[in-house]
Structure formats: C-alpha cells, structure tokens
C-alpha cells in the first residue's frame, strides 16, 4: 500500500464502510487493517477456511504441552476430541521418553 493510500485509509472510519461483511471485518480489526487486507486480496476470490481449521496446529501444540503421559481422557474431553486422536497426537512424545 503506497503512502497516499495509507494516508487516505487513516481517515477512513468503520462508519464509512458499506454495510456487510467488510464493515463487520472493520469493526473487528479496524478500518486501516481492513484496507490492508483488501489490498492483499486485490479483488481475488479466495477460500476462507473456518477458524477451527487454522487453529489446529496451535491446539495440537497445547495438547502436547499439557500431556502428562496418562491424561488422554481429560485432554480428549477438554478439547472435544477422541481418546484415539489424543493418543496418535502424543505417541511421539511417549516414544521419545
């Protein structure tokens, strides 16, 4: 985004955004960040994954961090996953000890 566009974007408020998804986005991340996002997308049609798909690696890291070697059931319940999934995710940790 060049300097003139960035200067103009600084004057943009959420209320100036058209109603719809981009106004909602602007309410969450701010008008300037919304403009930056629009410049990145550049009018392209893009697939937007559900948030839970993006969060999987971070969730798995937390599970592995919380894993004690015996708490498969507790982790499965906490994260809404199966015991088998937790076991497969953490089996490398068990094998390395």
Image: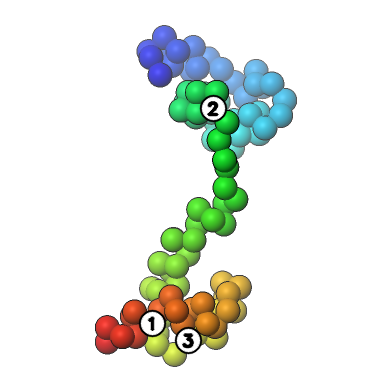
Determine which quarter of the picture holds residue 6: top left
Q: Quadrant of the C terminus?
A: bottom left
| Residue with the most extreme top position | 4
List the residue tagged with mark 2.
Answer: 44
Q: What element does badge 2 sit on?
A: loop
Which of discs 3 and 2 lies nearer the camera? The answer is 2
Which mark sits nearer the N-terminus, 1 or 3?
3
Position of 61 relative to 69 (above/below): above
List the residue tagged with mark 1.
Answer: 91
- CA separation, marks 3 and 2? 45 Å
Q: What element does badge 1 sit on?
A: helix
Position of 41 relative to 92 (above/below): above
Position of 40 relative to 50 (above/below): above
Q: Where is residue 31 in the image (x, y as percent from the top left)?
A: 55, 26
Which of discs 1 and 3 lies nearer the camera? The answer is 1
Determine which quarter of the picture holds residue 16: top right
List the residue tagged with mark 3.
Answer: 71
Q: Is residue 38 visible?
A: no
Q: Is residue 65 left or right of residue 74?
A: left
CA neighbours of label 3 inside 10 A, class few (<14), some (14 to 19), many (20+): few
Q: Position of residue 62 (x, y in %)?
A: 43, 68
CA neighbours of label 2 inside 10 A, class few (<14), some (14 to 19), many (20+): few
């Amino acid at each position: 985004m060049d300097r003139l566009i960035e200067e103009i974007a600084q004057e943009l408020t959420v209320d100036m955004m058209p109603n719809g998804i981009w106004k909602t986005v602007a309410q969450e991340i701010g008008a300037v960040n919304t403009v930056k996002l629009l410049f990145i997308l550049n009018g392209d049609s893009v697939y937007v994954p559900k948030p839970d798909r993006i969060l999987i690696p971070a969730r798995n890291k937390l599970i592995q961090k919380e894993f004690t070697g015996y708490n498969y059931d507790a982790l499965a319940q906490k994260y809404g996953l199966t015991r088998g999934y937790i076991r497969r995710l953490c089996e490398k940790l068990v094998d390395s000890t």
